[in-house]
Amino acid sequence: MTVMKVTLLGTGDSPGTPVIGCRCRTCQDARKHGWQRRRFSVLIQTDGKNILVDTSPDMRSQLLRLDIDRIDAVIWTHCHYDHFAGFGEFYRVQSNVTVYSSPEVHEDIARFMHFMSYRRLEVEPFEPFELFGVTITLFDVTHPPLRRAHGLVVERDGYRVVISGDTNRGIPAESIRLMMDADLLLVDAIAPEGYRLKKHMNAGEAIELSKKLRAKDVYFVHLGHFYPPHRIAVKKYPLAHDFQSFTFGEGSDDLSAFF
């Protein structure tokens, strides 16, 4: 039996790729060859349960693609639109979904979600909690101008998956200690090196962080159209792609087709 399966529902930044109205080389290539990067969400499956990390605006197509008809829990990392706005896509299908995050993130998102009722469960960063046999620990990252944003560590049976969350390179030391020695690191790298960014990391910063953390396997996520077209960029960078899956336990990694 599979211990845990992690699937990247979307690997794009806030506008996704191709960007509406953009005629850059990458967006043109995406249109020509029929590929895209949907907005960021991660699906964790274990013991027949489905846990979502963030609920992207592309949630409907993402869940339909994988034939997912029930969500058992949601974790929100921060209050930006591209990370929570898709919650309503499955809310109308099922009710009483429990959503986990810090008090500050819940408070910020509640300003937008006031018309929906859901089970709000507040968890403090650095304090592990259990979900369906999986141990999850939020940690603080730096994503200005937000007052609070998080990454998370997901653990089961000795396997560790670290999701950096949206962050610049100024991750607190306590968070760095928690992120060490991951079997899989999904790290924010919105643009190639050379881009000077306030809210995110570029590829060079993400690689530097990955080496510091001693991660066994690393993939870039939250990708913008600043990279060359995917088939070219992956020759240089460890870019993840939509619906890419990683299996921990019995069996090997299941890498879905990009298109």
Image: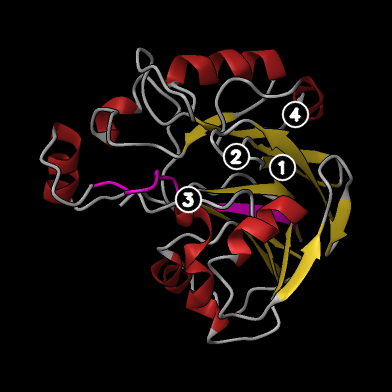
Q: Which residue was labeled with disc 2?
A: 165
204 to 191, vertically: above or below: above
Which residue is drawn at the image coordinates 50% and 51% (left, top)?
A: 80
Query: How would you rate the neighbour count of disc 2 (Cα within 10 Å): few for under 14, some for 14-19, many for 20 or more?
Result: many
The Cα atoms of the two marked residues, 1 and 4, are separated by 8 Å
Q: Is residue 166 left or right of residue 156?
A: left
* Contact (Cβ within 8 Å) of mark 2 with mark 1: yes
Where disc 2 sits, the SS reads loop
Viewer-side residue, 196 vs 28: 196
Residue 152 numbered tag: 1
Where disc 1 sits, the SS reads strand
102 to 181, vertically: above or below: below
Rendering quarter of residue 27: top left
User: Which badge, 1 or 4, comes first in the chain's sequence?
Assistant: 1
* Contact (Cβ within 8 Å) of mark 2 with mark 4: no
Q: Which residue was labeled with disc 4?
A: 179
Where disc 3 sits, the SS reads loop
Image position, residue 191 (x, y; %): 37, 26
Q: Looking at numbered disc 4 in the image, what kind of residue is underneath it?
A: Met
**Residue 15 colored magenta?**
yes
Q: Which residue was labeled with disc 3?
A: 40
